Structures are given as C-alpha cells and as structure tokens.
Amino acid sequence: MPYLLNTQKHKGMKTFYTVILLTISNTFMTLAWYGHLFWKGKLGFFEKMGLFGVILLSWAIALFEYIFQVPANKIGHKENDGPFTMFELKTLQEFISISVFMFFLIFVFKEEKPSWNHYLGILLMIAGVFFVFKKF
C-alpha cells in the first residue's frame, strides 16, 4: 500500500485519503473542543468533572484528532509526492473544520440555528478556497 501511495498515478487517491483523514480528524477536534458543552447537561459525569477533568478528557479525544491529522498532512503534502502545498493543506483543513462544525451544530448539537450571515460567511470561505487553489 505505501508503494501505491508514492506513484504519480495515485495522486487522486492521495487527495481522497487526505480529505477523508482530515474529515475524521476534524470530527474528533469538534468533539474535543465543543462536545463537553453539549453533553454537560446530558451525561451526569460531566457535572462532577470540573475544568481540569474536562481538559484531560478533551486532550484524550484530541489524541485521535492528531492520529488522523498528521498522516493526512504527510500523505497530502507535495514534498511526499502529494497533491497539496502546505498553504493548500491548511486551507483545506480550515474549510473541512468549519464544514464538520456546521454539520455538528445543525444535526447533532442542535443548540443554535445558523442565520443568513453564517451561510454568507461560509460562501465567502468557499470563495477563499477557490482562490487559494486557483492557478492564475
């Protein structure tokens, strides 16, 4: 498998793996950063946990973020025969991050309903992604 990922023919697969791994990574990141806010009133042990306990739990969840994020960047970076520059990887990660967050906000947390300005902001981010990846 590592041999296949190092051939020019499989750059499309490297793009796919990078996006999938970044999506999984950002799912864990969203849970680590915001999950304790959502589950505080729903899971009893959060009530007794205190800030230090929540930090440790978030770090434990964030470990899985890094388990997926580091390989995503390694597979996707041009220096490793991947399709993305470092700037493109960061742009892609930020776009995936906000997309995963919006998914959780709307379908899982259901605490806030995004308004028109949130959607406009996302459209502007999409335009930003377009300009970062556009070769002029």
Image (cartoon, helix red, strand yellow):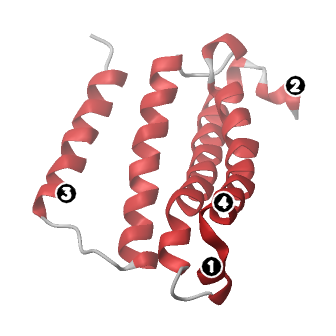
As drawn, the label of residue 118 is 3
Quarter placement of the C terminus: top left
Which three-letter amino acid code belongs to the residue tagged 3?
Answer: His
Residue at the spot of label 2: 3
Which three-letter amino acid code belongs to the residue tagged 4?
Answer: Phe
Q: Earlier in the sequence, mark 3 or mark 1?
A: 1
As drawn, the label of residue 129 is none
Asked if marks 4 and 1 touch (Cβ < 8 Å), the reply is: no
Residue 8 or residue 80, whichever sits in front:
80
As drawn, the label of residue 46 is 1
Element assignment for label 3: helix
Q: Earlier in the sequence, mark 1 or mark 2?
A: 2
Q: Is residue 111 above or below residue 62?
A: below
Residue 93 as seen in the image, left or right of residue 113: right
Q: Is residue 136 above or below residue 50?
A: above
Element assignment for label 2: helix
